[in-house]
Every structure is written in structure tokens, then in C-alpha cells.
Amino acid sequence: MPAPLGPGLRLGGESGIGPQPGVGPGRVGALVLQYSIKRLLLATVIISFAITILFCMIFLVPGDPAVIALGPRASAEIKEAFRARMGLDQPLPIQLIRFFVNTLQGDLGEDVWSRRSVTVIVFEVLPHTLALVFMGLAWPILVGVPMGCYAAVHRNGIVDKIAGVVSVSFIAIPSFVIAIYALLLFAVELQWFPAIGAGESGNILSRLYYLVLPSFAIGLGWVGYLARLVRASMLEVLGEDYIRTARAYGLPERAIVFRHALKVAIIPTVALLGISLGSLLSGAVFAEIVFARPGVGKLIFDSVMNRNYPVVMGAVLVTTVFLVVSTVIADLINAVLDPRIRDSL
Amino acid sequence: MSGNVLEVRDLSVGYSSPRGRVRALRNVSLRVPADEIVGIVGESGCGKSTLLAAIIGLLDNNATIEGGAIKLEGRDLLRLSPREVRALRGDRVSIIFQNPMTTLNPVLSIGTQMCDYQHRLGLSRTEKRRRAAEMLTRVGIPDAEHRLDQYPHQFSGGMIQRISIAMALQSEPRLLIADEPTTALDATLEIQILHQLRELRRSFRCSILFVSHHLGIISEICDEVSVMYAGEVVEQGNVRDIFHDARHPYTQKLLECDPARIKRKTEHLPTIPGDIPDLVELAPGCVFADRCERAFSPCRVEIPVRRRVSDGHYACCHLETETAVDG
Amino acid sequence: MAEMLTVENLRVRFRARTPWLARLKRTSPSFIEAVCGVSFGIGEGETYALVGESGSGKTTLAFALTGLVKVDSGSIRFRGEELRGLSDRALKTHRRHMALMFQDPVGSLSPRLSVQSLLTEPFKIHGVEGVDRDSEARRLLSVVGLSSDIAARYPHQLSGGQARRVGVARALALSPKLLVADEPTAGLDVSVQGEVLNLLGGLKKQLGISILIITHNLSIVRHVADRMAIMYLGRFVEEGPTEAVFANPRHPYTLALLSATPEPDPDAVLKEIELHGEVPSLLERPTGCEFHPRCPFARPRCRQLPPPITQVNEGHWLSCHYPVEEGYLAA
């Protein structure tokens, strides 16, 4: 029998932490608001960082920007006028601040050659690129997701095995290779789809028709990725206890897969799709060149060729903003899909 | 309705494995009379999960039923098509699972799941919701209408088990299977849920097949008990037969081991030495022979048959001298 | 008897996951106290049991003692020396003498390591040189009653009871003076539980080590512990010699726990004490006696004032305004 160990039980001097007001249901709403604010602040930081880097690029390019822009044979006065026009005669910090202020006001400078507003130029072609990117995204969603689901449900079946091989080969082939071969096969050889251009303006069907091949070219790799990812996450979900519960209630298999399992299995893919937009955008540069489509990619390419730096910077800035915004949207979609994420933001 | 809601006869189930056939269930017989609570007690590896999966027709793909019958309200489930069995699940028979944290879909609201599981009733969405809210109120969840819109992670484990019970009783099943429904809960909650289950059983007039490894819980809630060991039912009887007059050495040992039964402080707690036999290469004779202190020569040679101890009390042991009975 | 471990007024706080927007408005506390002001002592060669349900703070307390979570205030004296405020280096030598055995000792370890490597890993972690790993592993296995051929196996090849024994053996590797066992029998079949408990009891006798058992299972406590404490919401509500607490439980919560452990006897007549509702969130601690919302005997006073700490008998402490009469359960 052990000796008594003194006053074993003591609640401490103070009387605990007094009454606590409840946290209540407002907590979740506050968390979502807090999360949105956090993400917006982060987005602002990323975009500011991007602006600074872009600004520095002018100085990273060897030589005098005016010479680079105007060519070696421009006269001194023209160069001086160019410097004044571009604000290059100001001290660096002032230039940076002006660049920031202008950017925030939506002024991205002007085209070196045509003197048109860069903002106008970029936003003229932006819809074409967005349409291309989102159509590129439609392929993995419309083809990749069902393919992954089917493969998971019929695991180790013949379709699953074929889908596996096909997916990997989709992932392995670079999008510009697909672009060129798709062009040769479907446009030149079979003549199912048009080879170049963006279709009649104002005619949505025609626009969509012209989008098929380029979006196929940039989206195909992601069909493979998504199919693999959906398959893996679907297999995991189908083994979960709550799926067994659904089966125990005699729910039809289709309802189990599409209503109960897919909603969980899709969650990891949304984040991936957010990231995929970046690669789709760079794919769009090639696709726009190969298919001779108007768009931000082609704009950047042409401007680089013409040493039209304000346009390059403006276009890159706009796409950066687009990417940052789309990752935020992907996160928010995830929060909508998964109540656990929503509550733990 | 009288008679048996569920009757399992000579059920044998095997799994294919790289080492050979695992003979998970061998000649299991069991009946659940109307309005009664029948307990299955056994330790890990005794085959209770396999038995439940077989009853609800959700055995793994590598499992095969080698023989026997599972009769639910007189219809042999093994003779029905998978489609017909599916039609009975969640209608005539419902099940509550063990782990409250994983048993409900995390991304669908409680209301959505409860409405989905009324898929056979052909009611409107509003009507289904109304019924779901009513069921939640009945299992003691306050503010049910509002809580239908919440998600599983917003409930405690005890609440989830109550919701699971509400969900299972929605279709007014004849048989409710409870697979260790309180094992993951704290003891004080466990008792609350058990009492509730007993009350609901009365008002819904359904039978319960209650599976647990916890002897105290089984004795608390069940009318009849089957003791399983290594894929066989070794002893069967009403709750008093089993807990006061256990005949099979395994049952006796199991009861002896329960620390809750030992009131006086002991330095040395009893155990059952040894392991469950290998179900791939079954030795001849009684499955418990290797661990049994009272094993004698026939135990290693011959599989003991079911012997009647008294009315409704059976044990599969060579030590029982009364006449053998069939089935 | 010499003291092995003395804990005084120990507090562990965690930052609450509340939005800072809400914090600005001061609508919710920014900390939750998982352990609030706990004091107890374990003598040399003594077994002490901490009993509580989920959320009682018992595991946090064990983690605080073994240095896995930060202590907020209070004192931990181990073999006469204060551990709080020591540098990590200085702590490490003490930690060698205090081993934690996790709930699922083998499941929490790498499945790719053989039992032998698992057993001798603590030597590596603590940089103990000049140990013959083979013979050490054999010695440890024999201490816990396993044959030495187990050393070559991998965790998944062990049965539940064997796995626990390996867990105990690993905890014993550095010859600790205090073994902290978190739910040593959780998830084990009843026929195997005794095996692990007997082992722990034997170790106490053979090696003279002190043991702290953390569990929710009252029925095992009776057989293994010399002293015990019942925890609720991070505080001790009743503490005393195990025999005294079982013979004469006075706190309503202790009674509820006892009556919630049904005996395997359909005819057992035990007064049932059913508690209302569930354990409240640590974010919303009730006023007065924190047990009052669930207590079947609560009176108005319980809602308002925190209960005093009283000694009901030699070494048997209680925190309740209206302790249950002696012999209530038997009546």
C-alpha cells in the first residue's frame, strides 16, 4: 500500500475560466470571410511581386531599353523622346511606383509602335485565349472524369487497362506535337475541322467549331492526368465505410458512384484543375501560333519578335492575374464541395 | 408476425487467398425470432463480420458461399438475384455500423443522406425531409429540422450513432443489424444509446441482431446469444443460459477473462493462452481443442456436433453428453 | 516511499481555432485549456491510473509529462528534479527514464522495420553506444515473455497481444523508471487484455518501475492500479487509492462511469446513473461545477460555484458540492 501522497487533488487557486459566451453558428461564416480576406491579401502580394519582376525585366535585358526598342540606328532625339514617353528618364524607385500606380489604374502603358493602349490591345484578344483555355479544360472534365470513373468502377477490366495505357500516352506527348499532328490529320487530311483562324465573329457555333482542334491539342494531356487521378481517388472512395453504408441501404450502383462517391473523389481533382490552367495557358501560346489564332499567346509571341516590351509586360501581367484568380477560385470551389474544408479554413 | 425474422442454416463461407481457401464460416446456424434482440459475441477473427456481410449480401468479391441458407422472413436470400437482395437492403433489413466517424458521407448533408436512403418510398423531397426530421426528433436530436442541413463532421460520435439509428429505422425494417454500434463511444454514452435502441425496438417492433465483443453490453441488451469462435457458433442459448450456465469451455473462459466480472482485485488476470487456429489448414476435431484445458481424445479427432443442453440452449462440445440434435 | 513523479497545478493550453475576426470582437476564447490545474504524485514502484472519457484531457496530460506537448504552467518534478524550464539537452537525459507506450504501439511504428530494429531504435535515438543489439533485443523480448524468434518478424506478422508486448518491450529498452502506458488494452480482445495487464503488473514487481496507465476502461483499473484519478474536462473530480474509490465512490461522475461498465450478468442489479447529454466542448465550459449540466444530482448551487476540494478519507479527494452517500450503488 503506497503512502499517501499529500493533497492529491487540487483545482488551482482561481476558479477556472468563468462563463464563456458561445461561439454560435456565426463562426463558420466568419471563418469563410476570414479565409477570403487572407486569400485576397495573398493574391495581392503575388501580383505585386509579379509586377515588380516584370518591371525589373526591362533592366535585366542587356543594353539600353530605348536602343533595344528602337533599334541601333535611331537618332539621339528619337531615343530621348522615347525615354521621356516611357518615363525612363525618372529615377528607378519613381519609375517603379509610377508603374504600380498606372497598373492599378488599369493603365499598362502603350504599344511602342502603334501607340495604342496596351490594356485595350490585351483585352481585345483575351477572350479568344480564355475561350481556348476553358475549352481546353472542358476536354479533361468531359472526357477524363468519366473515363476515370468508368475505369475505377470496372477495375482491372479491359477498358480500365486500355484507359491506363491511353492516359499515360496522352500525358507523355507534348501539346505542340499533338497540335501539329491534329492539324495534319483532322484539318489537312480528313478536313473535318478548319486549320486556321478563330471563326466568324458573332457566330458562336462557328467560333466553337474553330476551337475544337486547338483546345483538343492543349487539353489532351490533361485528359490523361485527370483520368488517372479520378480513377485513383475514386478507388479510394469506393472502399470507404460510407459507401458500404450506401450499399447497405440498397442504393443503385449508379447513384452510389455519381451521387455519393464522385462528390468526394472529385475534390483532389479541382485543385489539380486550378494548376492545370497555367499549363493550358502556355499550351495556348503554341496552339495560337500553330493554328494562327488571335490571342494573348500569339500577342506575346509577336510582341517579343517586335521587341514591343510594354505589350509583353501587359499581356504577361494579365495572364498572371488570371492564374492567381483561378487558383483562388479552385480553392473556393473546393470549400463549396467539401464542408470539412469550409469549416476548417 | 410470429416465427423467425431471420434464419441462418448451415452457412459456410470461404475466401480465396494466396495461401489457399480461408474457411471463414463453417456451418453457422442462427435464428432471430420476431421482436427479439439476438446477440452475437466473439473475439476478433471469429467470423462475425463475414456473417453480417453474408446476411446483407455484401460479401467481398473473393468470398464464396459454400452452402447453407439465409432466410429473411421465409425467403432464402441465397436463391434471390442480386437485384432482389438489393431491394431488401435498407427496406426489410437495415444495418448500423461501428465507426461513427466514417459511416456517413462527409460531403453530403445529413438530410441529403437520410432522404437518399428513402429512395424506395416514392415520396416527394419535402415529404422525405419531413419524415427524416421526425425520425431525428425521435432519437433525441433537438432542432432536427435545422440539423438536417448540417454535415457529419459537425456532430459528435454519439450524435452520429443516433442519426445512424434514425436512418436505419426510417424504412421500418423487420430486422435491424447493429454491428458493434457503441464500441467507439464513451461508456456513459454507450449506455444512453443502448437504452434508446431498446426502446425504439419496442415502438418499431423490429428484431435486432446485435454484434459485440463486449460481454457486459450483450448481457445488458440481448434476449438470446450466440457465441462464435473461429468461424463457428460454439454455443447458443438465451442470455441467462449463456451467462449463468455456460457449457462450452470457450464461453466459460471468455466470461472468466472479462475484467468487469472480477470484482476482487487480482494480481493475475485470467487469459486464454494460444491463438485462433489457422483457417486455411484446419486441424481435424474441435476448433478450440488447442486452447482448451479440458480437451480429451475425441476433441482432436472429431468435430463436435451441436448438442442440446436444455430448451433452446445448445453447445458444440464433446463434453456435453446429451443427445445430438440436427441443425 | 520515495516520490517518482510529482505534478503540481499543471496546465496545458492550446490556441483555439477561432477566426481572428471573432477574436477581435471578443466573442470566443482564444485558448482552450485541455489540462487545468492538475496535481498528483506517483511513488516509486507504484501504478497510477488516469481515467477519463474522450475529451477529458488524460492523453494531453500524459503527453505533457513526457514532453510531447508544451506545458503552460505548473511544476513537474521527476525523481526530485524540476523538469519545467530545463533545456532540451538537459531534458533528454530525463526522458530516457520516462518511456511512453502509445495506444497502438506497433501501428504507430514503421511497418518496414523488423521487431529487432524497433526494439533497438531507442538506443539509436538516444545515442547509446556499445550495446549489443542482438542480445539486447533478446533480453527485452524475454522480459515481456516472447520468444526470441519474434525479433526477425515484422509488425504485421504479430497478433494483437504480441504487438502490445513488443510495444512494452520497446518502451523498456532504455530501462526507464517510469512507464506511461496510453490505453494499453484498447482494441484488444478480452482474452488478451489480461495478458498485457499481467505483464505490466509483473514488470512493476520485477523491475520496480512506476507505471502511469491512461485509460477509459474502469474495469481494468481495479486490478492494476494502486491509486487512481477520474478526469473530467481537464480536471480531477475524484482521486484516491483505487480500492477506496471502487469501494466508496463519491463523485456522481465516478458513479456514472462505474454503472456504465455493465457486468456480464443479465441479472446484475446495479443502480443505473444515466447522464444527460454529452461532454461539453472545451470552448464552452459550463459555469460553477463543470459537471452540473450532465449531473443527475445537480442543485442550483452547482450551477454557480465551482466545488471545493475536500478530503473524504485518508488520501481520498473529491471535488463536489454534494457528494453521493456512501454505498449508493449497492443500495
Image (tube, grey):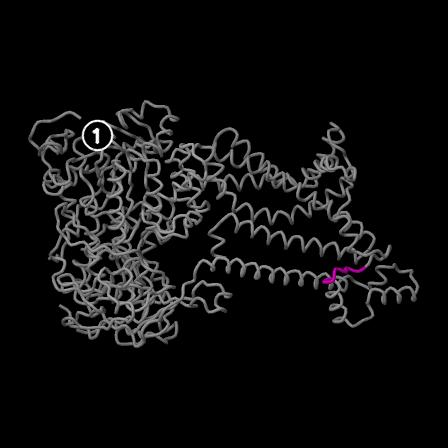
Residue C123 position (above or below residue B217): below
Residue C295 position (above or below residue A258): below
- Kindly tell me whether residue B170 is visible in this rendering: yes
Asked if the stretch drawn in magenta spans residue C196, the answer is no
Indicate left or right for A46 with B112 as reference.
right
Circle 1 residue: B29
On the image, the x and y values in percent for residue C112 come to 38, 49
Mark 1 residue type: Ser
> Residue at coordinates 35% horizontally, 28% vertically from top-left?
B85
Could you say whether the residue bearing mark 1 is in a helix, strand or loop?
Answer: strand
On the image, the x and y values in percent for residue A257 come to 47, 36
Indicate left or right for A284 with C146 as reference.
right
Asked if the stretch drawn in magenta spans residue A108, the answer is yes
> Residue at coordinates 52% horizontally, 43% vertically from top-left?
A266
Which residues are drawn in magenta? A103-109
In front of the other: C328 or A255:
C328
Residue C80 position (above or below residue C162): below
On the image, the x and y values in percent for residue C7 come to 28, 72
- Kindly tell me whether residue C45 is visible in this rendering: no
In front of the other: A266 or C124:
A266
